[in-house]
Amino acid sequence: MKLKSALITGGSGFIGHHLVKLVSNPIVVGRSIKKLQKTYPDFESYEWHPPELIPKEVFDNVDVVFHLAGENIYKGRWNEEKKKRILESRRIGTRTIVESMCQAKNRPRVLISSSAVGYYGDRGDEEVTEDFGPGSGFLAEVCQMWELEAMRATSCGVRVVPIRTGIVLGRDGGALAEMLKVFRFGLGGRLGRGDQYMSWVHVDDLVSIMAYCALNEDISGPVNAVSPNPVTNKEFTKTLARVLKRPAFMTVPSSVLKLVLGEFAEAVLTSQRALPRKLLNSGYEFKYPVLEAALTNLLRKEQ
């Protein structure tokens, strides 16, 4: 599954590194032209600082826009300043990319814009699909705003697909890379009560889903980009420990998480049992639908 041309914001990030492999002629944009040129010396790249618009001519040969840019939620303790950066980077960045696309003479055919299953808020063990409405809480509010900004592109004839991701599993970034720092030393364990559901996806599946949605004209609106088999935090912990052949006897109480992480504890203690109904109904076949197989693929060198 290979795309001919695409513009990628946030292309130098964790997911962007994997996504560029599926594009024959990617154009990457980001905050540092030096970093982009060092990372992708053979690709066309542009420096971009929202709310500055991307020049019209950049879109002349672009069929698809993948909008991945936004403040990293995993880095740094959540306080009011951090939360403001998370919200505003998505609000301003998404609004700017949409305005840039709509003012271009040759508009892209589709916008694939990042979002998250945090949209649903805390749902316990309830199975949620794309038909469910938004929940409450900071992340749910961020995702609602994020998607509303992206959907504005429909006003200028662009198909929009907000990609609601769960926990993206990859060795080179995201939540798993942070977990491995602890689990390798046998200090892993469940978070809080451990009964909260974790909707997860292998990074290879995620970028394939993004390309699949870009190519499939019948898909529009939000898509849950998660494995069809979500697990509880307790199940995730046991599986990761088993694959790593490490003990996982620790338990981190909710009170400690809130003390250390601030309001980011909300992100790891809330429960989203999201299912990828749209993808399954459209015929998408997951490469890694089961957690143990996904982790084994990513961590086989450590076994």
Image (spheres, rainbow, N blue to C red):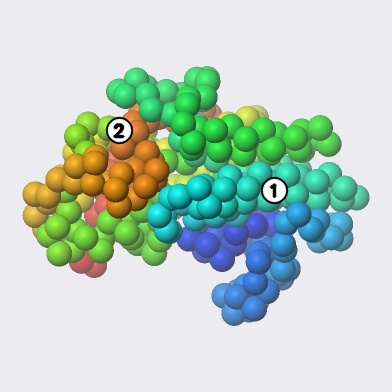
Examine the rendering and report whether any part of residue 277 can be seen.
no
Identity of the residue drawn at 29% across and 40% down: 290
The amino acid type of the residue labelled 2 equals Tyr
The amino acid type of the residue labelled 1 equals Ile
In what element is the residue under mark 2? strand
Q: CA distance from mark 2 to mark 1?
A: 31 Å
Q: Which quadrant: the C terminus?
A: bottom left
In what element is the residue under mark 1? helix
Examine the rendering and report whether any part of residue 282 can be seen.
yes
Q: Locate residue 186 relative to residue 61 in the image: left or right.
A: left
Q: Locate residue 83 relative to residue 271 in the image: left or right.
A: right
Mark 1 Cα within 10 Å, few/some/many (few <14, many 20+)? Answer: some
Q: Which residue is mark 2?
A: 197
Q: Locate residue 260 relative to residue 248 in the image: left or right.
A: right
Spot occupied by residue 173 in the image (x, y as percentages of width and height): 40, 61
Q: Which mark is residue 92?
A: 1
Spot occupied by residue 297 in the image (x, y as percentages of width and height): 29, 56
Mark 2 Cα within 10 Å, few/some/many (few <14, many 20+)? Answer: many
Front residue of 150/228: it is 150
